[in-house]
Amino acid sequence: MELNPNKFMESAVIAIEDIRLQTALERATNNADGRRRTVFAELDDAQALRQQGRGAKLRALADLPDLLEQMERNVTAKGGHVLWAADADEANQLIVDICKQHNLKRGVKSKSMATEEIGLLPFLEANGIQMVETDLGEYIVQIDHSHPSHIVMPVMHMTKDQVRDLFMEKLGMPYTDEAEDMTRLARTILREEFLNADFGMSGGNFMIAETGTVVIVTNEGNGRLSTGVPPVHIAVVGIEKMVPTWEDFATLVQLLPRSGTGQRMTVYVNMFNGPARADEPDGPEEFYLVLLDNGRSNIYASEYTEALACIRCGACLNACPVYQTVGGHSYGSVYSGPIGAIITPLLQGKENAAALPFASSLCGACKAACPVDINIPDMLLMLRRDLEQEQDAIWRLGMKAWQFGNTHPLLFEVGGMVAGAASRAFLAATGADSINVLPYPLSGWTQYRDFPTFAPQSFHEWWRENKGS
């Protein structure tokens, strides 16, 4: 499956016609958003908690360079290794170098959007290193040779029947309609992978600077097994995941599960900051933390800094009417939905994801759902502004002419009269009920929707006739 953000419109049209996808999206997004609303309604002052969480992330961003150095010092002091990766290529090469240094050939990995972002698994495979996803959703995606469609729920695009058919085809599972049977099979297979792995990998939901601790929150035991059983643990974490103190973490860990899955707390909260100590029976012999930039510093230095406050809960996806309709794969990126429409152009280059900032109705549901109150609609408008300024001279001249005509009452009224007369003449000549084809550049509208007919009488004419006195 090819990921291409600039093919959003084509992918969205296909997604809308996919009945099974529409069924899966309706069930999953409605359930997730409904659970989020329910658990937040239990709080005495949910808005105060949101603002407290927002403050924690913004303070972290304000002091990010110092906090990253503090994180490095604390991890190193506990016997861990900290590596800095400027981009995806460097991160992938660093991980392969670690594998070669320790002769690692087979790994297990808990859920990580950062490793999806850098395309780690294909790179490892090209270097003779096998990696198995152990999060159930990610495992399903891996054996399907596809990509996650959601930040938190990777297989939101699939129904239970599709998963059943996939397991029967790829894993030889006997026919069953019971989800319990499917998960039991996956658990049996993955337990062997944990025991045979040379190394384990994870991402990180948070990094706590004051103690040099990486935290992952999961609902499956795979996270702890991936990081504690194999002799080597490699964590790949984006530099924006930093928080200053445990008090800040205590706030954010209340917001993340409520927003992401509608839980008061996830089943597992795993914390690690280095290899196992001499008196600890569990844990890796070696711990590596790869701090991933990959464009984040450019965002940090721009007017879009607030986008780095995202805690990757996926709440904005579940609440977004566009995502609910077209799903995650339409965005052509690891990061989909409203926050993905911001992050992807900023990480990959605006010209490489020019369609995504326009994949929004600007209804504001994303901002209302965001647990740290990121102003997503405003940033989408800012990106649209940036993209408009990068258009060629003819486009900019046309937009200025449109602006001039719409800000001068006489021109606006005359233009409406001419357009109305022309549209009525066209409909009379063709006998059609609506206009479904317009010449370029207006064809950009009728390519995806009919052009509405003009009213026989404009509002200005009606006002003069009825309220003129």
Image (cartoon, rainbow, N blue to C red):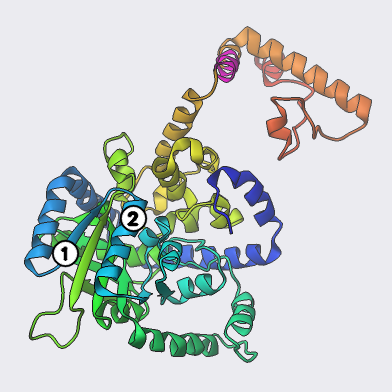
Q: Is residue 123 left or right of residue 44?
A: right
Q: In the rendering, at what x and y percent does residue 88 appear?
A: 36, 52
Is 109 in the magenta?
A: no
The amino acid type, in three-letter code, at marker 1 is His
Q: Which mark is residue 371?
A: 2
- Residue occupied by mark 1: 81
> As rendered, which of 201 and 463 lies closer to the eye?
201
Which of the two labelled residues, at mark 2 and mark 1, occupies the earlier sequence position?
1
> As rendered, which of 389 and 310 lies closer to the eye?
389
Q: Residue at x 58, y 10 (%)?
A: 408
Residues in magenta, as a range: 393-402
Q: Quadrant of the N terminus?
A: bottom right
Q: Residue at x 13, y 58 (%)?
A: 72
Is 395 in the magenta?
A: yes
Q: Quadrant of the C terminus?
A: top right
Asked if residue 49 shows in the view, the reply is yes
Asked if residue 365 shows in the view, the reply is no
Q: Which mark is residue 204?
A: none
Circles 2 and 1 in contact, beta carbons < 8 Å: no
